[in-house]
Image: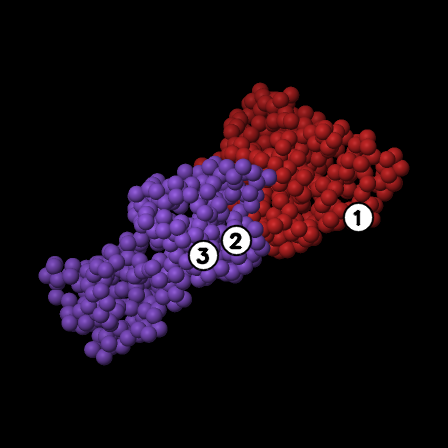
Chain colours: A red, B purple
Amino acid sequence: MTTNEKIMYRCLELAGKGAGYVSPNPLVGCVIAKNGKIIAEGYHKKFGSNHAEINAINSAIKKGVNLKGAELYVNLEPCSHYGKTPPCVDKIIQHKISKVIIGIKDPNSLISGKGIKKLKQNGVRVKTGVLVNECRELNRFFLKFVKTGVPYVTIKTAQTLDGKIADKNYNSKWISSIQSRKLVHRLRRVFDAVLIGKKTLEIDNPSLTVRHVKGRNPYRIVIDRRLTLSLNKKIFSDIFRHKTIVITSAKAGKKKINDFEKRNIKVIMCKTKNSLIDLKDALKKLASLGITSILVEGGAITSSEFLKNKLADAMMLFIAPKIMGDGINAFNITVNLSRFRKINFHHFKKDILISVKK
Amino acid sequence: MTTNEKIMYRCLELAGKGAGYVSPNPLVGCVIAKNGKIIAEGYHKKFGSNHAEINAINSAIKKGVNLKGAELYVNLEPCSHYGKTPPCVDKIIQHKISKVIIGIKDPNSLISGKGIKKLKQNGVRVKTGVLVNECRELNRFFLKFVKTGVPYVTIKTAQTLDGKIADKNYNSKWISSIQSRKLVHRLRRVFDAVLIGKKTLEIDNPSLTVRHVKGRNPYRIVIDRRLTLSLNKKIFSDIFRHKTIVITSAKAGKKKINDFEKRNIKVIMCKTKNSLIDLKDALKKLASLGITSILVEGGAITSSEFLKNKLADAMMLFIAPKIMGDGINAFNITVNLSRFRKINFHHFKKDILISVKK
């Protein structure tokens, strides 16, 4: 590993600390080095607050370090435009930092390369393309969102070895172990939203909150084309209901829509396709709310519908070492997962996790 | 790792070379050391031929080594009785070997410890219990067979991620990759027999031979309670048909039984239980033919029947990264695999193998 790579790994580590709090901004970490020694670090902590570069520069200044001739490492191209905060490149130039080492360029085609250009025009040396795959992996939600205008979608299922998500009576409580459930809660705190189908809400009445680990709750999205779900369900009546979103269609009754909105629950009207919600339309509308990532938590109809429409970027299958025989199938469609490039698997104390990614 | 363990690993390595050829005998490897240096090796190569200890001693003699004061390592207690060959302990004593290091004792309760006793009575020092788990693992077929009188049964399935072994039309050709099929052929050459149900034979008409790798063919067993299978099937008509065994019941027609036997195909009559072949009875009868290990290669009815009757010692599930949705289920029963202690998994280029063992 080169020195550039080592320091870029540190940037990614720092960047990761913002997961769950910076969306729809990217995860960014920044390290400043001088004469081969790290002198300051920073990361983007929260949407709307200082960028990583500014936090690192401020940290150096606080320590009384002269930044002239220093090298700044950052996993994403520094911004050159006025957003919620002033442009980072101006600050870099102002402090006479001599070199900037960048992981990947800004994915927004309108501004990509502009930050780099301005730095070079002002005599700052620039190197790009360090740990490109790792940088893309960390910001896969942001990159998908910016490039396509739809959120990154991961389908999560918990099933037996023979692909059943519940027994014949829809009892699924025992499918996965506490270790797996903890991991699901860790996912919920970094995904902007979790999504389920109407049937899962009716049968399981889940909270969809983060409980087994510390962290913030995600948006909770349920698809209900005719809006017939009872308002008594947990996600419509608990104290987090302002983070609940219902996706419905013109088939929904106006009074029912009002009932939901009165409770501060957002109702999104979507197109239908073959008598089902048009998921592409739903994803675009969710993206317009700043949702960059969605964890689909079932059931079979919802998961299959995302796969059928090629709207899934990744899948995480938790497999319990049990055989069910007769039961509820995890999927109702045929998919060759070879279009998902990467397949990984982990072995917990009890379950196996197979994860596939595009 | 101690020196004893290091040399015992070499014994196990040598022993493994006999896999597929020594059954119903155990796999045994032997190493002779003198003054801390390995001077001779041997293993049991083929049923009815010299035991490992004799091969190692002969190898030392051939080299002109005086065995007085040497140490002999062997993964299983040396025999003290006349079988197909004279007792190994007599040979050890005759050559004045000073110490014998043994992996595990003989599992046969009638003779267990007798070899050790005779060695000690003749002034040979004995140490037992080196790499006990590894020794048991290597000879799991033999140990199960000797202790219980039934063969070791491994259930093998090839399925999609959602537990389907074929599509609705029973087309299963594409379930697993060439890498997985090669491994199955490597299994076939070490298991004494492979076993399938009637339906699998009817639909797939498999050869059940070893083709993708080098090695000997196993016995091929099919269950057909009424003996209605056509004699045109490959396993009844190819040149290996003398290694085909049909398990049937009193429901079978006498003429049909004759037709099979005329072709040198063994027909075994078994009891029935709930209108199905009594698998325990079948296993005992197969054991009486010297079959110590069986690889059950499907389908759902047969695999499930073995699991239901708790007759499976291990399972190997090859999982292709595909989702079928609608299709033929791998199993038709509910089993909690937590009674299988060990769960391992391997990742091939394309498939995943989950293996569980008691």
Look at 30% across and 73% down and name the residue there: B111
Q: Secondary structure at mark 2?
A: helix
Look at label 1 and name its amino acid: Lys
Q: Which residue is mark 3?
A: B249
* A124 in relation to B270, above or below: above
Residue A233 is labelled as 1
* B304 in relation to B105, above or below: above
Q: Which chain is home to disc 2?
A: B
Q: Secondary structure at mark 1?
A: loop
Give x and y (percent) for residue A314. Answer: 59, 37
Return the disc, 3 or 2, that comes first in the chain's sequence: 3
Q: Which residue is mark 2?
A: B304
Counting other residues with Cα less than 10 Å from the Cα at mark 2, is it few (<14), some (14-19), or many (20 or more)? many
Counting other residues with Cα less than 10 Å from the Cα at mark 1, is it few (<14), some (14-19), or many (20 or more)? some
Look at 39% across and 65% down and name the residue there: B149
Q: Which chain is home to disc 3?
A: B
Closest to the observer: A341 or A45? A341
- State the separation of the CA atoms marked 3 and 2: 20 Å
Counting other residues with Cα less than 10 Å from the Cα at mark 3, is it few (<14), some (14-19), or many (20 or more)? many
Quarter placement of the C terminus of chain A = top right
Look at label 3 and name its amino acid: Ser
Give x and y (percent) for residue B259. Answer: 36, 48
Q: Which one is in front in this view, the residue at disc 1 or the one at disc 3?
A: 3
Q: Secondary structure at mark 3?
A: loop
Specify the farthest residue to the front. Answer: B255
Closest to the observer: A254 or B6? A254
